[in-house]
Image: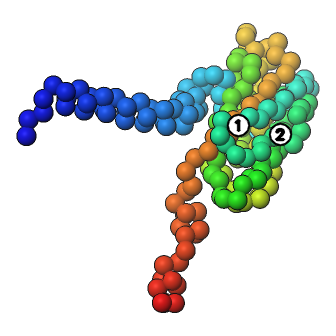
Amino acid sequence: MAIDGKGKTVLQLVGVVVTMGALAWASVPFYDWFCRVTGFGGTPNVADASDQILDETIKVRFDASKQRGMPWEFKPVQHEMEIRIGEQGLAFYEAYNPTDRPVAGQASYNVAPYEAGGFFSKIDCFCFEEQVLMPGERVQMPVSFFVDPGIVTDRDAKHTQHITLSYTFYEIDLPEETQAALAPNSDADASVN
């Protein structure tokens, strides 16, 4: 069966629409991955604890936002803390699912000012994994971090007085394990009949 000129045009348009939809769907996770790999956009490092703690301090501010349509409530438990450079800090963010369904989310993050991103190191973070909240569930999620002492000698970052750590939560598909745990047990249903 041969496809005429109109058929080819329709197929090309369908291909463009499917490609654009796939790119839009993958844009947030891809950008998050890109920033983690390259450090672009002030994305912090992931590291073990610092072995040097300075007498100088720095203020760390915490910010939270959600992608449009994300049904959770999401906020930092405290908005700011002052720590010594190199000292391990621990902060918490709170998430609440006010819906009547389980909702899965993933957090993307960045650091401002941009120059400080390479010196802000996370030891452990809720953002490293997908989060699933059941209906009405409220959780506090930790992030442990330190500011690398190299910040005080860096040409661009040495005058930094405060750093802002920002998270944005976006909704993702429920993990298969969660879907399976929530699905009605077909064996039990079959034995009842």
Q: Quadrant of the N terminus?
A: top left
Return the residue found at the far top. Answer: 155
In the rendering, at what x and y percent does residue 191 appear? 48, 90
For the point 74% across and 34% down, the residue is: 65
Tag 1 residue = 66
In the rendering, at what x and y percent does residue 124 appear? 71, 45
For the residue pair 84 and 8, the one nearer the viewer reads as: 8
- Looking at the rendered image, the disc whose residue lies closer to the viewer, 2 or 1, is 1
Colour mode of the rendering: rainbow
For the point 70% across and 37% down, the residue is: 66
For the point 8% across and 35% down, the residue is: 2
Task: Say which amino acid is labelled 1.
Answer: Lys
How dense is the environment of label 2, judged by Cα within 10 Å: few (below 14), some, or many (20 and up)?
many
For the residue pair 130 and 103, the one nearer the viewer reads as: 103
Tag 2 residue = 76
Residue 188 is left or right of residue 145, and the answer is left
Task: Say which amino acid is labelled 2.
Answer: Pro
Return the residue found at the far front. Answer: 6
Q: CA distance from mark 2 to mark 1?
A: 12 Å
How dense is the environment of label 1, judged by Cα within 10 Å: few (below 14), some, or many (20 and up)?
some
* Quarter of image, res 38: top right
Label 2: which secondary element: strand
